[in-house]
Image: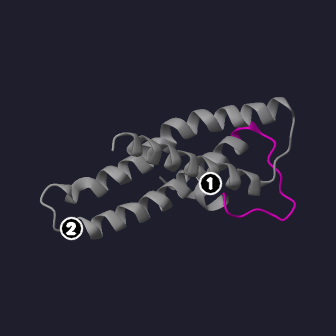
Amino acid sequence: MAMMLVLANEIFVFPPQATLSLFKDIWLNSFLFGLYSSLFVHGIAAGIAFIKLRKHPRAIFFPILILIVGVISPLTYGVISNAAFAGVLKAAQFDLAPIYCLAWGVVQTFSIVFISFTRLLFTL
């Protein structure tokens, strides 16, 4: 637990000229940014769902499913796609600024949200 807190603390503290060149650094930063942004978006969605469904007898538990999807998606899709992303950059010997890992994580979150919405619309 303490190791994860250290890594989560170090992810947001970079010198102005910091670059990421190791596979582990690129993968970890892009994965954590994707996880944090997914938890943020799904947390807001779960809060709204809880407020709107608080009087429903069975749907009150639906926000819990939203939070579970917000954690499971980055742990499955995020791990694989971030490993591929980091592998390509490592093979190309490309140094990456940490802000691009943030952008990659946010794009992953929005792609997960987009896919979730399109699957829901097909069922209506």
Inspect the magenta stretch and tell me whether residue 82 lies in it.
Answer: no
Please, what secondary structure does the residue beneath circle 1 have? helix
Q: Is 3 situated above or below 48? A: above
Where's residue 109, x and y in %?
56, 50
Residue drawn at the location 38% of the way across and 45% of the way down: 120
Furthest residue to the bottom? Answer: 51
Q: Is residue 104 left or right of residue 88?
A: left
Quarter holding the C terminus is top left
Please, what secondary structure does the residue beneath circle 2 have? loop
Furthest residue to the top? Answer: 91
Q: Is 107 situated above or below 81? A: below
Mark 2: few, some, or many residues within 10 Å (few <14, many ≥20)? Answer: some
- Quickly name the residue at label 2: 54
Its colouring scheme is one colour
Instruction: Decide which of 19, 61 is in the foreground and name it.
Output: 61
Q: Is residue 118 left or right of residue 97?
A: left
Residue drawn at the location 16% of the way across and 68% of the way down: 55
Q: Which residues are magenta?
A: 11-24
The image quadrant of residue 64 is bottom left
Where's residue 20, x and y in %?
79, 47
- Quickly name the residue at label 1: 106
Q: How many tags in the picture?
A: 2
Mark 1: few, some, or many residues within 10 Å (few <14, many ≥20)? Answer: many
Where's residue 63, x and y in %?
30, 57
Mark 2 or mark 1: name the one nearer the start of the chain. 2
Q: Which SS type dominates the magenta stretch?
A: loop
Where's residue 18, x and y in %?
83, 57
Query: Distance of mark 2 from mark 1, alpha carbons?
Result: 30 Å
Instruction: Decide which of 97, 7 is in the foreground and name it.
Output: 97
